[in-house]
Image (tube, rainbow, N blue to C red):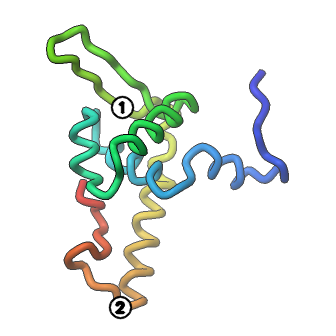
Amino acid sequence: MKRLNSKSGCAVEVTLSVMGGTWKPIVLFHLMHGTKRFSALARAIPNVTQRMLTLQLRELEEAGIVARTVYAEVPPRVDYALTDLGRSLQPVLIAMRDWGTDYAQSQGMQDEGPGVQASCAA
């Protein structure tokens, strides 16, 4: 049985250890809309480096949140999709999006340029 790496025993800490950080929730939000190739994710999240995107996808795959499928084609094709466990995070991600939209509006943040977008450019 896998042991949880939580010093405090707090379930929120466990959740954040799996999906926390700057990029993982954004990657998961884009994958909520269906299977994506690496290049499509990189285009959808222009501020993330390829190295960081690779690292985040690898960690999400190791956690059982994302499935990576490699096709024996030339050129090689790799697809990423949410697993059932990953899809169970959809309500959390939607709540984060909604809260972010409400917060941005309450603070007078504009929805222009690199500002807040409820869709995360999905």
Please name whichever residue, 111 or 21, is drawn nearer the observer in this view of the structure: 21
Residue 32 seen in render: yes
The image quarter containing residue 87 is top left
Query: Residue 19's x, y, as percent?
Result: 55, 47
Q: Which residue is mark 2?
A: 108
Disc 1 packing (10 Å; few <14; some 14–19; many ≥20): many
What is the three-letter code of the residue carrying label 1?
Ala
Residue reaching furthest top? 72
Q: Please name the residue shown 27% across and 45% down the image.
A: 42
Count of numbered labels shown in the rendering? 2
Viewer-proximal residue among 21 and 103:
21
**Residue found farthest to the right:** 8
Task: Tell me the SS state at disc 2.
Answer: loop
| Mark 2 neighbour class, 10 Å CA radius: few under 14, some 14 to 19, many 20 or more | few
Instruction: Specify which label sits upstream in the sequence, 2 or 1.
Output: 1
In the rendered structure, which amino acid carries the disc numbered 2?
A: Gly
Q: CA distance from mark 2 to mark 1?
A: 35 Å
Whether residue 83 sits left or right of residue 116 in the image: it is right
Nearer the observer, 11 or 25: 25
Contact, CB < 8 Å: mark 2 with mark 1? no
Q: Residue at x 28, y 69 (%)?
A: 117
Callout 1: SS: strand
* Residue holding disc 1: 81
Q: Is residue 65 above or below residue 28?
A: above
Query: Residue 33 appears at what percent x and percent y?
Result: 29, 44
Furthest residue to the left? 74
Residue at screen point 83% across, 49% down: 7
Label of residue 57 in the image:
none
> Measured along the vertical axis of the image, is residue 11 above or below residue 78?
below
Look at the image and tell me in which quarter the N terminus lies.
Answer: top right
On screen, residue 102 above or below 39: below
Asked whether residue 87 is in view, the answer is no
